[in-house]
Image: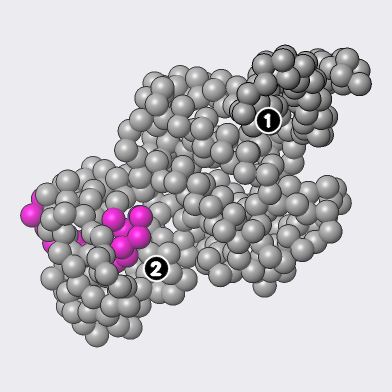
Amino acid sequence: MIGTDHSLAGVEIREKFSFTGRQAEALMEEWKAREGVYGIALLSTCNRMEIYINTEEEKVDYCGLLCENRGLQKGEYGAYLRERSGRDAVRHLFGMTAGLYSLILGEDQILTQVKEALSFAREKYAADKVLEVLFRQAVTTAKEIKTKIHPVRRNLSAAGEAVKKLKRQGEVFAGRKCLVIGNGVMGRLTAQTLLEEGAEVTVTVRQYHRGIVDIPAGAARIDYGERYKILPECDYVFSATASPNLTLTRERLEMCMGNRKQIFVDLAVPRDIEEAVGELSFVTLYDVDDFVPDISPEMKRDLEEADRLIEEGVEAFWSRYECRELIPAVKGICDLAAADLCGRLEKPFRKRETVHSAELLPVVEESAGKVVARLLYALRDELDAEHFRECVEILERRFR
């Protein structure tokens, strides 16, 4: 795994490593073509960018390759990247998927984003079986943590933390007019959070969308191209798109705004709102890094329990991973066991000759193979890799 996140880099650096869908597809296609690379998946969110690779290559400068892909100098930007391999990479994915390494601890969106990253890699024929199993196990463990442990049962999000912090500073949202730029997952969540505070919320939508555009019930909508017209009426403006382009610029704001005090919140990476907007006397501008929640003693205790569940999940995956080369042997044992059973049944079947006997044997053989496979994989999940190998070797000798 190679990547960066909020703990390593500020938003101005993270946005240099963010990927659009097309950029992610191009990088995965390029790296998947490298000799010894079997699978690749890329995750790009507002707080992190991480690439997971299943490869037999051991001495590859992925840091240099990534910087080259982004048009950056490794000497200047390599310090913002981290590489992990083996169990370290696996454990990081599990913890990250559970939201334990997020800027907003336990946030819910990362679980969906991880699933979408795997789905996108699969769609682009970049993911292999190892990454498929790895990501699915990470998602399963994350769901278990969110079900059992308090911090990750709460509906945490950057939008929620932004609203909470602004309220602590004396801001009031009930009855105030808010504009949300963006109708993706983060935009809809932001709009819903503001509606729950009693705000009057308007959400931008794109004209090119066909059919029904889903926005939270109770929110109004305007076309994205009309956003500057409504801005002078708004008390709060939240921007949360996945676009690499700016949604608001200082020049355009100066042309349409007065001197009314307003708060702008940029929840996107790359940032949606031009940084120079914050220099306007009537604007207070925040970005996603401004909303870091405090960790209570209760949350620290729950994190210890989450770590335990993560270790169990990592061990379950790693046990399978270490035994992956035994899969052909397991299949061979299943086939031999099924053939042995059918051989033993053939004579009784001949004595009780019916019109269905010829049809039954293939069904019995297939079912027997599945039963043996289930038993063997149950052993694999319960034993360490060394003992499971011994069992497979014994069975292979017995059926030869």
Q: Along the horizontal axis of the image, is 211 left or right of 40?
A: left
Find out whether residue 175 is within the magenta segment: yes
In the displayed structure, would residue 24 be above or below residue 372?
below
Q: Which mark is residue 272?
A: 2
Looking at the image, can residue 253 be seen?
no
In the displayed structure, would residue 23 be above or below residue 115?
below
Colour scheme in the image?
Answer: one colour
Q: Which segment did they paint magenta?
A: 173-188
Q: Decide which of 393, 80 is in the foreground and name it.
A: 393
Q: Amino acid at mark 2?
A: Asp
Image coords of residue 254 (percent x, y):
26, 81
Q: Picture quarter containing residue 388? A: top right
Q: Picture quarter containing residue 129? A: top right
Q: Which mark is residue 216?
A: none
- Residue where numbered disc 1 is placed: 358
Q: Picture quarter containing residue 26? A: bottom right
Which type of secondary structure does the marked residue at label 2 adopt? loop
Q: Along the horizontal axis of the image, is 212 left or right of 331?
A: left
Tag nearer the camera, 1 or 2: 1
Find out whether residue 215 is within the magenta segment: no
- Report the residue at 41% width, 23% height from top: 149
How many residues crowd mark 1 within 10 Å: few (<14), some (14–19), many (20+)?
Answer: few
Q: Amino acid at mark 1?
A: Ala
Q: Quadrant of the C terminus?
A: top right
